[in-house]
Amino acid sequence: SQSGFWKVTATDDADTPSAVQWRLRLEQPLEASGVGLVPAGDVYFSAKVDLDAFRDEARSPAADALVLTEGRVTVKEDIGINTGIFNARGILAEFKIVGDFEMRGAPNA
């Protein structure tokens, strides 16, 4: 099962969303043909909202399609250490980009 959140991270002068972020939690690693692509845990997505493309699409059958560009998929990797005396896991972390994407709604049937 997955759980997560989303939020608007930037707006233009008219208070229209121009960038969004969301997080999904993977309970199991994402694999393809037995190869691990994304580890279990939080997966972070961020993208720009392309309003010009959205307006152009309004003239097409996919008028209600949301267009996202410059998307990035990121995972957090703990880089702390765990010794018998001191547990530093979770204190230090590195965010790694594991993919990119563009997204648009499917055309209306």
Image: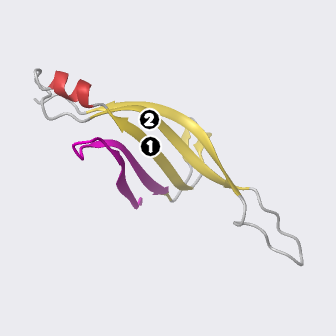
Q: Is residue 49 above or below residue 58?
A: below
Q: CA distance from mark 2 to mark 1?
A: 5 Å
Query: Which residue in the rendered view is the most extreme toward the front?
Result: 13
53 is within the stretch colored magenta: no
Q: Main secondary structure of the magenta part?
A: strand
Query: Could you tell me which residue is drawn at 44 percent across and 54 percent down?
Result: 23
Is disc 2 in contact with disc 1, using a CB cutoff of under 8 Å? yes
Q: Residue flagged by tag 2: what amino acid is it?
A: Gly
Q: What residue is shown with label 2?
A: 71
Query: Could you tell me which residue is drawn at 78 percent across and 61 percent down?
Result: 80
Q: What residue is shown with label 1?
A: 46
Q: Quadrant of the C terminus?
A: top left
Q: Which residues are magenta?
A: 1-25
- Mark 1: secondary structure: strand
11 is within the stretch colored magenta: yes
Q: Quadrant of the N terminus?
A: bottom left
Left or right: 54 as drawn, with respect to 71: left
Residue 50: quadrant of the picture: top left
Left or right: 87 as drawn, with respect to 63: right
Seen from the viewer's position, the closer of residues 49 and 44 is 49
